[in-house]
């Protein structure tokens, strides 16, 4: 096996495992209508490098296998994550590597999860209308990815720039 292939497989496995570990460690707030899935901060890794895409998708799929909603959450939640990751990569590619594009990119997971997880919750539970479910999911994603995630990734990027200079 090539050195680069082994490195890619290792990085993918580490990102997936980290996503799963964070989700399960905070499982009490990672599932449901109002969710603060701390592992979602990691989706911003694809803003830094698209090589993290597969690890994030696998981590999300494995984490959603532990969801009280079962296989439907694996399918719907992972699909929402794939769309969010594609959005983040698109924004980075078209707008560049800056704080404004990071903030805009962070809204991809908010919108994608609000729509698809909101639909899923509405169909499965029929307790609340779609707009309420979508708003709950969007709120959690916004707090975790757009607020906490952007702050954390801005600090990391700043630190990396200081180290490399």
Image (tube, rainbow, N blue to C red):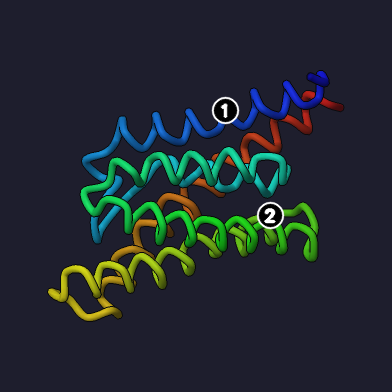
* Left or right: 19, with 136 as reference point: right
Q: Alpha-carbon neighbours of circle 1 within 10 Å: few (<14), some, or many (≥20)?
A: some
Q: Where is residue 123 in the image (x, y as percent from the top left)?
A: 24, 74
The residue lying at 32 percent from left, 58 percent from top is: 72
Badge 1 element: helix
**Quarter that holds the C terminus:** top right
The residue lying at 65 percent from left, 40 percent from top is: 52
Tell me the quarter of the picture where residue 102 sits: bottom right
The residue lying at 73 percent from left, 23 percent from top is: 7
The numbered dot on residue 69 is none
The numbered dot on residue 13 is 1
Work out how far the residue at label 2 is from the one at label 1, CA to CA, in angstroms: 28 Å
**Quarter that holds the N terminus:** top right
Image position of 5 with respect to 87: above or below: above
Q: Position of residue 93 (x, y in %)?
A: 79, 59
Report the front residue among 58 and 25: 58
Which residue is denoted by mark 2 in the rendering? 99
Q: Earlier in the sequence, mark 2 or mark 1?
A: 1
Badge 2 element: helix
Q: Alpha-carbon neighbours of circle 2 within 10 Å: few (<14), some, or many (≥20)?
A: some
């Amino acid at each position: 096996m090539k050195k680069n292939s082994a490195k890619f497989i290792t990085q993918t496995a580490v990102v997936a495992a980290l996503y799963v570990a964070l989700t399960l460690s905070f499982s009490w707030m990672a599932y449901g209508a109002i969710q603060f899935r701390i592992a979602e901060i990691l989706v911003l890794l694809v803003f830094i490098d698209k090589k993290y895409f597969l690890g994030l998708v696998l981590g999300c799929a494995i984490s959603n296998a532990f969801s009280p909603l079962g296989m439907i959450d694996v399918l719907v939640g992972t699909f929402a994550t794939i769309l969010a990751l594609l959005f983040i990569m698109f924004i980075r590619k078209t707008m560049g590597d800056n704080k404004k594009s990071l903030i805009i990119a962070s809204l991809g997971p908010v919108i994608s999860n609000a729509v698809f997880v909101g639909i899923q919750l509405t169909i499965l539970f029929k307790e609340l209308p779609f707009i309420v479910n979508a708003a709950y999911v969007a709120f959690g994603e916004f707090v975790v990815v757009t607020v906490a995630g952007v702050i954390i990734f801005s600090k990391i990027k700043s630190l990396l720039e200081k180290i490399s200079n």
